[in-house]
Image (tube, coloured by chain):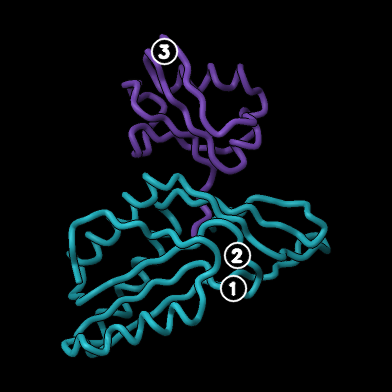
Chain colours: A cyan, B purple
Amino acid sequence: MKDNKIKNVFHQGAITSDFIGSSIAKHQTKTAIGAHNIFLGQIRADQINGKTITAIEYTAYEDMANAKFHEIRETAFEKFDLTCMHIYHSLGEVKAGEICLFVFVSSPRRRMVFEALEFIVERIKADVPVFGRERFEDDTHQWKVNS
Amino acid sequence: MNISIMYFGQIAEVTGVKEETMLLEHRLISELVSFLIQKYPELESKSFQVAQNKELVSFDTQLTGEEIALLPPFAGG
């Protein structure tokens, strides 16, 4: 449901499949919804100069980030006919193969959720001050930059 | 004017602190940035944006003394 409070989007550590599953289950009572769409961001074990990324450690300018998530949320509700929308982003360590971003949009009809989800994910990547320290197997690191 | 400055990600790696408060007389963001580059020369080679009171601002913006943050490239998702 839409409300105007700034929410805390951050979630310590990886987002589990149990958490995602129970989020979906909670919507069974909302029978005006006819279509859900979900984006799950997963950590890739990229190989860079022969070394493999094993985890990303996320930090954020949390106050500004939550304000930006809120703006994105407000804009998405204005642009698209959504029944509800949820965003969760990890902080701290998330290992390769684990989920770090969960975006969940619901609407009476399918067309809206396809468009809304892409809009929201692209805005998150571009506008939200979240930082990722990519750790390699030998404990060296580099900083992630969104392309 | 007492200014609180926060550093994040690789910028905090350069400064060695996540936050500090300074008594400064600068009037523009660009003057503050030049001052910080003098204090932390390695910042010169880093890419960052400046937020004032939780909004990104250009370097020719007036410094109001609210919360300042140096933000390296975003990496959410």
> At 76% across and 61% down in the image, what residue appears?
A48
Tell me which corner region of the image, top left, top right, bottom left or bottom right, holds residue A74: bottom left
Report the disc number at residue A94: 2
- Residues under numbered marks 2 and 3 in contact, where contact means CB atoms less than 8 Å apart: no
Residue, disc 3: B26
Quick check: A56 left or right of A74? right
* Front residue of this view, candidates A145 and A67: A67
Quick check: B44 left or right of A24? right
> At 35% across and 84% down in the image, what residue appears?
A24
- Residues under numbered marks 1 and 3 in contact, where contact means CB atoms less than 8 Å apart: no
Question: For mark 1, does the 10 Å Cα neighbourhood hold few (<14), some (14 to 19), or many (20 or more) residues?
Answer: many
Element type where label 3 sits in the image? loop
Question: For mark 2, does the 10 Å Cα neighbourhood hold few (<14), some (14 to 19), or many (20 or more) residues?
Answer: many
Residue A98 image position (x, y, % from top left): 59, 73
Q: Amino acid at mark 2?
A: Val
> At 27% across and 54% down in the image, what residue appears?
A6
> At 41% across and 52% down in the image, what residue appears?
A128
Quick check: B50 left or right of B46? left
Chain designation of label 2: A
Q: Are marks 1 and 2 on the same chain?
A: yes
Q: Are marks 2 and 3 on the same chain?
A: no
Q: Is residue A60 above or below residue A91?
A: above
Element type where label 1 sits in the image? loop
Residue A80 image position (x, y, % from top left): 21, 72
Q: Measure the alpha-carbon separation of dots 1 and 3.
A: 45 Å
Q: Amino acid at mark 1?
A: Glu
Q: Is residue A85 above or below residue B6?
A: below
Q: Is residue B28 above or below residue A100?
A: above
Q: Measure the alpha-carbon separation of dots 1 and 2.
A: 6 Å
Residue, disc 1: A98
Chain designation of label 3: B
- Residues under numbered marks 1 and 2 in contact, where contact means CB atoms less than 8 Å apart: yes
